Image (tube, rainbow, N blue to C red):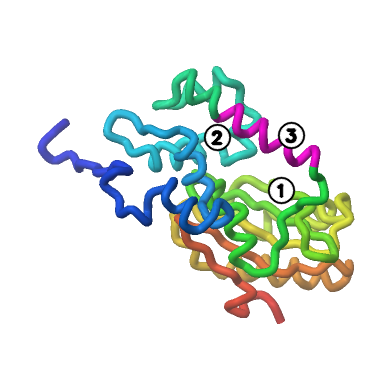
Amino acid sequence: MSANSPVQYTPLIRDLAKNDRPRERLVEVGPQAVRTDELLAIILRTGTGGESVLRLAERVLGQFGGLPGLARASVSELRSAKGIGEAKAVEIKAALELGRRLMATTPDDRPRVTSPADAANLLMSEMAFLEQEHLRLVLLDTRNNVLAMPTIYIGSLNTSVVRIGELFRAALKENAAAFIVVHNHPSGDPSPSPEDVNVTRQIAKAGQLLDVDLLDHIIIGRHRYVSLKERGLGFD
């Protein structure tokens, strides 16, 4: 390492304030209020090579594209990630399989979205560290229960790429009464661009014609989000 090379400091869990440690936060505020990267950090238990377990969890989620990517990955694929040995890979797969089996036995126990924060928290940790823009939908029934959260696009979000019909095709396939658009800004800054507002306006108008409500458009950054509905952008 040269003398001019920046030194990156990632505090270990023991260096964090007690209220910022994942295990203590789960006990204090409950599992529902704990971020996905924090839950994964609890499963992983230890970091690697001067990298805290929380940073390791963030990096692995970003590398595999969030929980769906982790669920699809094999043990050998998980082991290819720096800091993930066979034991950690097996523990990740076991935890995800338990979640899958629980959902299979309780199909009516779906998350409910009643605020922008609810929707952002569903996808924040999965999308905050992606290197490309991803556009996903949170599809909802008449009681605002989540039906599905499909990925519709990967790449720059602009009107020349986004075909509004693709969004509504996914909504109609699930018989959704409403949906929320969620996309990330890889820069980490969730501030809406003029193109984000323009896309939102077009989707909202199409929803009025098709009687499927666009409830919000949420932009995710690094542990921050912006609700265009709250800011009155793109919604007349």
Q: Check disc 3 and give the amino acid type.
A: Arg
Residue situated furthest left in the rendering: 3
Q: Check disc 2 and give the amino acid type.
A: Phe
Mark 1 or mark 3: which comes first in sequence?
Answer: 3
Q: Which residue is mark 2?
A: 64
Q: Which residue is mark 3?
A: 101
Q: CA distance from mark 1 to mark 2?
A: 17 Å
Q: Does dot 2 land on a helix, a strand or a loop? A: helix
Classify 10 as above or below 20.
above
Q: Which residue is mark 1?
A: 152
**Residue 198 screen position, x and y as percent:** 65, 69
- Disc 1 versus disc 3: nearer the observer: 3
Front-lying residue, 108 or 197: 108
Which residue is found at the position 58% from the left and 78% from the top?
231
Which residue is found at the position 86% from the left and 51% from the top?
174
Q: Are marks 1 and 3 in contact (CB under 8 Å)?
A: no
In the rendered image, which quarter contains the C terminus? bottom right
The quarter of the displayed image where residue 171 is located: bottom right
Which residue is found at the position 82% from the left and 65% from the top?
143
Residue 183's mark?
none
